Amino acid sequence: MSQLKKLERDQSFAVDEFNQKFISSEEPQYNNKKIDLEISDSMDIEPSSQTEDLGIHMKNLFFKILEILANGENPIPYIMSNSRRQFVFAIMIIIIGGLMLFLSNLMISS
């Protein structure tokens, strides 16, 4: 005789009643706040200066991160302290990742 047959089962269990405990008659209340997704407002950067100064900001951020790492400190608070630094760091990571992908594909094909 298997172990399942030996177990006493509750025959009064009703699936429909069990499911009704979890179904709510109220509609879910979602946060109806309007979200402003404009990059220029949220980052306090003018769109024209964004593309022109991106290289300069990337260079400055890169050398500042190297300087912080040379002192043995954590560069993440410096990066996250300003929305411009966060944006430039994200672009820098995307460019580095793209270059790594490109170089790996070149090495595989040759």
Image (cartoon, rainbow, N blue to C red):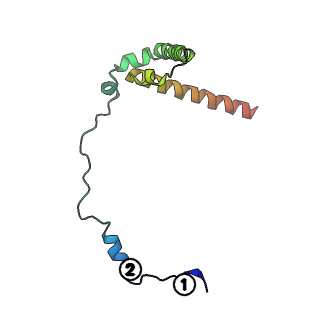
For the residue marked with disc 2, what is the amino acid? Phe
Residue under numbered circle 2: 13
Query: Pointers 2 and 1 in contact (CB under 8 A)?
Result: no
Look at the picture and state if 53 lies above or below 100: above
What is the x, y in percent for residue 88?
46, 22
Marked residue nearer the N-terminal end (2 or 1): 1
Instruction: Compute the Cα span from label 2 to label 1.
Output: 18 Å
Residue lying at 43% horizontally and 15% vertically, measured from the top left: 52
Residue under numbered circle 1: 6
Horizontal placement of 76 versus 43: left or right? right
| 10 Å crowding of disc 2: few (<14), some (14-19), many (20+) | few
What is the x, y in percent for residue 54?
45, 17
What is the x, y in percent for residue 80?
42, 25
Look at the picture and state if 22 lies above or below 102: below
Quarter holding the N terminus is: bottom right
Horizontal placement of 106 versus 11: left or right? right
Look at the picture and state if 99 lies above or below 35: above
Residue lying at 40% horizontally and 19% vertically, measured from the top left: 50
What is the x, y in percent for residue 97?
58, 30
Quadrant location of residue 42?
Answer: top left
Which numbered disc, 2 or 1, marks the residue closer to the eye?
1
